[in-house]
Image: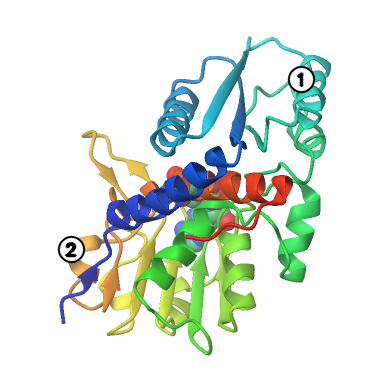
Amino acid sequence: MTAKIIDGKKVAQHVRSECKLLVDQMKKLGVSPGLAVIIVGDDPASKVYVANKVNACREVGLDSKVYTFPANATDQEIESEILRLNADPKVHGILVQLPLPAHLNAKKLIASISQDKDVDGFHLYNVGSLVAGTTLFPPCTPFGVQKLLEYENIPVAGQNVVVVGASNIVGKPMALMLMQQDATVCICHAKTRDLAQFTILADILVVAAGKPNLIVPQMVRRGAVVIDVGINRLPNGQLVGDVDFEGVKEKASYITPVPGGVGPMTVSMLVHNTVQSAIRQSGLQLEV
Ligand code: NAD
């Protein structure tokens, strides 16, 4: 068996074109959706991520504005900008680009974002709503994985899902979202003993550990769906995931490549969350 390769770029583009249709309709009705991005310091990777978000917004006609603070900015300075954005009716989504410099209190700053504009879904209110199955803003990376499964018509209910990685931004929300769709979910992490005894049971295996070649073919059940969230830069400059792609694709039924799998979905889901937020806040009834 050779797996079907899930084309994340294509699905991400599909999500963006749906968003664009909604933005066009909203603009005709006098609402212009807007995203505010806060970035602190000069971290080169963060700058690239923010530029990607701005470009995606531009592509669908969303207004985006970047608020740049110097690396020595204080919690108070950033929080007062967030509070101002919370009250600005032209802003429908607010995100703080992570990681923040170590002297800042990231938890407190995220808590100061209005829960109704928290498009990253990191505010504790939205984390709690995710546990209850009612969140307005599913976190973008696991939301992207969910969309890929949906787009490929891969059933989730009743499936054995194994999530490798238990971070707050990927592994934990991923597990909750798939459990909400009636999967039987197991979460593994760095302290899991004998990872393979769990991964081999997976009908759907989602890997988000940040370790190249963590998942090799003998750890994967024949016919499993394998979603690789990992992004790792090898010493030779090559970008790879956490899965031995060439080996595992001969055993899986579906697999995501790196790059071009989950990565492009994350930014598209941010755009989706912002558009949905604008629809909710404006009280419009729109559909694509
Ligand atoms: P993290 O470092 O916060 O968490 C990693 C998790 O993996 C932890 O729970 C850890 O216990 C687990 N882990 C580490 N080594 C392991 C091992 N040997 N066996 C089993 N579990 C192990 O990382 P994160 O922020 O969740 O990101 C994970 C990966 O996903 C990274 O490669 C990151 O670059 C990538 N990522 C991709 C996107 C995207 O848009 N595609 C978004 C976010 C993160």
Three-letter code for the amino acid on which mark 1 is drawn: Glu
- Point 29% across, 68% down: residue: 255
Q: Specify the amino acid type for callout 2.
A: Glu
> Measured from the top left, where is residue 270 in percent x and y?
53, 45
Mark whose residue sits in front, 1 or 2: 1
- Image point (48%, 81%), residue name: 156
Decide: is 57 above or below 241.
above
Q: Give the residue at mark 1.
A: 81
Q: Kindly tell me whether residue 215 is visible in this rendering.
A: yes
Q: Colour scheme in the image?
A: rainbow
For residue 183, which quarter of the picture? bottom right
Estimate how packed mark 2 is, as few (under 14), some (14 to 19) or many (20 or more) residues with alpha carbons within 10 Å: few
Say which mark, if any, is on residue 246: 2
Identify the element where label 1 is drawn: helix
> Which residue is found at the position 38% from the left and 50% from the top?
17
Q: Position of residue 44 (x, y in %)?
A: 44, 20
Residue 98 visible, this orientation: no
Q: Which mark is residue 251?
A: none
Q: Tag 2's secondary structure?
A: helix
- Residue 17 against residue 256 in the figure, above or below: above
First in sequence: mark 1 vs mark 2: 1
Quarter-of-image position of residue 34: top right
Query: As rendered, which of 67 and 288 lies closer to the eye?
Result: 288
* CA distance separating discs 1 and 2: 47 Å
Identify which residue, 259 or 208, lies in the foreground: 259
User: Where is residue 139 shown, x and y percent of the image?
Assistant: 60, 53
Foreground pick, 86 / 141? 86
